[in-house]
Image (spheres, rainbow, N blue to C red):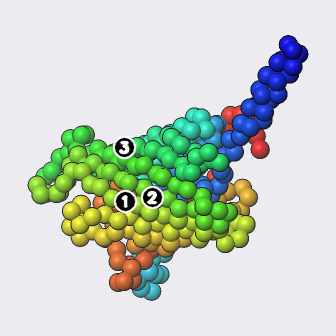
Amino acid sequence: MKKSLFLSIGILISLSLFGQEETEYVHGLFRGTHIISGQSAETQRTGELDLFIAHRFGRLNSGFYEWFGLDQASMRLGFDYGITDWLAVGVGRSTAGKEYDSFIKARILRQSNKMPISMTWASRMYVDGSAPLETQPLLFRHRLSYSNQLMIARKFNDRFSAQVMPTHVHLNLVDSVGQPNDLFSLGVAGKVQLTKNLALTAEYYLTPDLFLLTNTTRPLSIGFDINTGNHVFQIHFTNASGMQEKALITDTNGSWAAGDIQFGFNMVRTFKLKGTRY
């Protein structure tokens, strides 16, 4: 009787353990930590350092004299480091406004066979490094601005991934009394994998009229991710000159309809500083 009881308990425990499904995480939501100008829900793995170079030329409709925008260029240089698989930090510097930025990025949820979405939070601080006008000196706090963004992404299949990005920007100093210090925008983005090493990407930020600054427009970018093995090379066309969240929402003034299209590229090189190399 006792043997039968112990045998039954052992069978039930074995069946219970066997029935527990192992978590299988989804990989490759996007090719890197940036979709085009904005960030993706991906984070660096532990000990990874990304050298991120973003380059943006002038407008194609500037004509032959400016070599269709190639004579005009701006860039952002950044270093992003994965403290853990779910937490990353980074610093960068943009030529536009001689602006410095730093960010912290944390993965909250990761898509798996048990979780339908990935969710990541990013907060960034910006410091305007441009020289002030002699007639209008700037206090340090006036140079500061901030952005907060929640990235909600899902990989639907091996070909298609999508992401939405509710975004908040706070400006310590605004141009006029009527301009809001806090701006809100909803970003949407997607990736279509065309071949093993080539993907089509798109990114758009829908800013409500209430928060759309004077003489600004909504940024739309279309690009391609090219996997070269050693690094990711992203080329794109956009009406935005900015290469981070605040600039996308506050500084975009180009129009696709008017031909205010800029060519640009991002290049990412990853260095493994800690842990097993691969």
* Camera-nearest residue between 126 and 276: 276
Q: Amino acid at mark 3?
A: Met
Identify the residue under disc 3. 125
Spatial CA span between label 3 and label 1: 19 Å
Whether residue 240 is visible here, answered yes or no, is: no
Residue at the image point whose x is 11% and y is 55% from the top: 177
Q: Quadrant of the C terminus?
A: top right
Task: Examine the rendered structure and indicate whether residue 34 appears above or below residue 143.
Answer: below
Identify the residue under disc 2. 164
Q: Please tell me which of labels 3 and 1 falls first in the chain.
A: 3
Q: Residues within 10 Å of mark 2 (few under 14, many from 20)?
A: many
Residue 148 pos. (x, y %): 37, 46
Secondary structure state at the residue bearing disc 3: strand
Residue farthest toward the left in the current orientation of the protein: 177
Q: Are marks 1 and 2 in contact (CB under 8 Å)?
A: yes
Task: Examine the rendered structure and indicate whether residue 9 appears above or below residue 143.
Answer: above
Residue 133 pos. (x, y %): 19, 53
* Camera-nearest residue between 33 and 209: 209
